[in-house]
Image (spheres, rainbow, N blue to C red):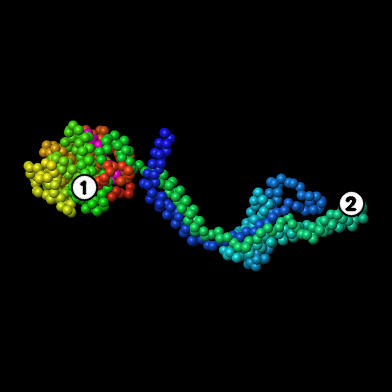
Amino acid sequence: MVATSDSSTFLRRLAHLLRVRAWIIALAVVLVTGAAVGFSLLQDARYRAESQLLVNRTNLGDVLTGTQASKSPESDFSRVVQTQADLARVPRVARRTLDGAGLRDRSTNAFLAQSSAATDPSTDVLTLRVIDEDRQRATRLAGHYAREFVRYKRDQTANRVRAVRTDLERELAEPATRSDQARQVRGQLRRIRNLAALGDSSVEVVQTPSTAEQTQPKPVRNALLGLLLGLAFGVGTACVRHALDTRLRRSGDVEQRLGLPLLGRLLAPPKELARADRLATLLDPTGPDAESFRVLRTNLAFADIEGKARSIIVSSAVQSEGKSTTVANLALAMARGGKRVILCDCDFRRPQIERFFDLPREPGATGIVLGHATVEQALVEFDVGAASAAGVPGFHGPSSNGPSAAGGGGRLQVLPTGAIPPNVGEFVTSNALRDLLTRLSARCDVLLVDAPPLLQAGDAMALTPHIDAILLVARLGLVRGQMIDEVKRLLDAAPISPLGVVITDASVERGRGYGYGYYYGYEEPEPEEPAADLSAASR
C-alpha cells in the first residue's frame, strides 16, 4: 500500500512538472527537430555501395606440401581476414580500382578517404565499401574495388608461384639430386604448375552491388532522431529547471511555510477585466465570482471567531500578487454582508484603490493629516447595491450618517491615499497617520487597509503596531519559497496577529478550488524575481 501511494504521488508530481514546464519541452523538441531537419537539408548527397569477398582457408604452403588445411583457431583466422582487409587498403589496389572505373584523374588518397574495408569476426567475409556523390559512380567503384583486389591477390600469388617453380626446376636440374628427392621435387613442381594454371583462390568475389544506398541526407530519420533527442533534452532541462526554480505552485507549500490557514483561492481574471481595473463583484454582484468572495468573507469570520480584528492590513510579499484587487472585492463582500466597512488605501508608493472605484485621489488620507479636509469630507461612501451594466459604480458624495439603501444594512466608505508625500517612510511612521487609523477604526465595524508589499517597503510593518491583524495574499507561480520564509520571519517578529493567507492565480494548481472560479486583478510579473524596490509597491 505504501509503495502504491508513493508511486501515485511520484506520478502526480511528474505530471505536474510536465504540465508546468510543457513549454520548455515543446521548445526543445521544436528547436532540436528543426535543427536536425535543417542540417539534413544542408548536407550534400552521399551514396554507399558494398561488395563482399570470401576469404578461403587454404594457403600456398598447404598446396606445396600436399596437405589439407589445418584447423587453426578462429582468432588466428580472424587475423588472416583482417590482413586481407589491410591489403585492400594499399595504394596500388586503389590506383587499379580508379583506372578500372575510368577515374584516372582522381587521386588514390581521395579514393581511400571515401572507401573502407570491414570485417566481421563471426564470418570469413570481407566487405568493401565506397561512398560517392553519384549513385552510379559509387556502384561502379565498389564493383571494381572487389575485382581489382582479387586480381591484385592473384598477381601476388602468381609472382610467388613463378619464383617457387624456378627454384624447383633449378633443383631438379642439378646432377646431385637423388632419385627419391627428384621424385618429390617433380611432385611439388606438378602442383605448382596446377596452381599457376588455376590461379589464386584464397579471395573470391561473392557479391557486387547493383545499386547504391543513399546515406545522406536523410531528413525523415534525422527528424525522428531530433524529435527523440529534443524530447529527452526537454524533459531533462525541465527537471533541472524545476529543481532550481523556487517559485511555489502549490497552496499547501504556502500554508506549510507560513504556518497559516488557507482562507481562499482566487482564479486570475480575464485580461480585459484586469486592464480595465474593474472588480468582479461590481460587474455581477450575484454571480459566482462575487460568491467566491462571500466564501472568503465567511472564512475570514471563522479565522477571527472572537471578533477582535476590527482593523486588518492586506499585504503580500512582493508586487503583482493581487492584494489591492483582493481587498477591494473583500470590502464590497463584507459591506454587502451587513458590515460597516472602511477601505483605506495606505499604499502611498503605488496607490490603486482609487482606480477600482473611479475616485479622485485628493483630499484622501494625506489631506486629512495635513488639515486640508476632515474625515467626513475625505471619506467617499459607495452604494454597495449600485453598479451600472458597464461595472461603473455610482457615488453619492461625502459620507452620511445613514446606511446605504442596499447591502443588507452594511455600508462601504473608501479613503484614497491623497497627494503622495515626498517621504513616504516618515509619513507612515508619523503619529498623525496613527491617529487617523485609530479614528477610522472607531467609525466602522471593519477597517481594511491596503498596504505595500512586505518585502519591498517597510511601510506595512510600520503600520502593524496600530492594526489588529494582517491578511496575506500570495500568488502561485510568482512568489518564491525564500520570500515566504522571509515574510514568516517578519510576521513572527511583528506585534500583529496573522489571520491567514489567500492564494491568487489558483489556476496554476489544477484540480483544487470550491467548484467555481473567482477572479482577482494583478499586473503582469517581471520575467525574473522582483528586486526589492522601495519606490514601488503592489496593487
**Type of secondary structure dominating the magenta stretch:** strand
User: Is 210 or 249 nearer to us in this picture?
Assistant: 210
Residue 505, magenta (yes or no): yes
| Three-letter amino acid code of the residue under disc 2 | Gln
- For the residue labelled by badge 2, is the local secondary structure a helix, a strand or a loop? helix
Q: Is residue 325 above or below residue 87?
A: above
* Quadrant of the rendered image containing residue 89: bottom right
User: Where is residue 328 shown, x and y percent of the image?
Assistant: 19, 45
Residue at x-position 25% and y-position 37%: 500
Badge 2: how crowded within 10 Å, few (<14), some, or many (20+)? Answer: few
Left or right, 153 with reference to 464: right
* Camera sees residue 320: no
Residue at x-position 40% and y-position 36%: 5
Alpha carbon distance from label 2 to label 1: 121 Å
| Three-letter amino acid code of the residue under disc 1 | Gly
Instruction: Name the outermost residue toward the left.
Output: 401
Q: Which mark is residue 287?
A: 1
User: Is 526 or 247 nearer to us in this picture?
Assistant: 247
Q: Which residue is mark 2?
A: 181
User: Where is residue 274 shown, x and y percent of the image?
Assistant: 24, 51
In the rendered structure, which segment of residues is drawn in magenta? 497-506
Residue 59, magenta (yes or no): no
Quadrant including the N terminus = top left
Residue at x-position 31% and y-position 40%: 251
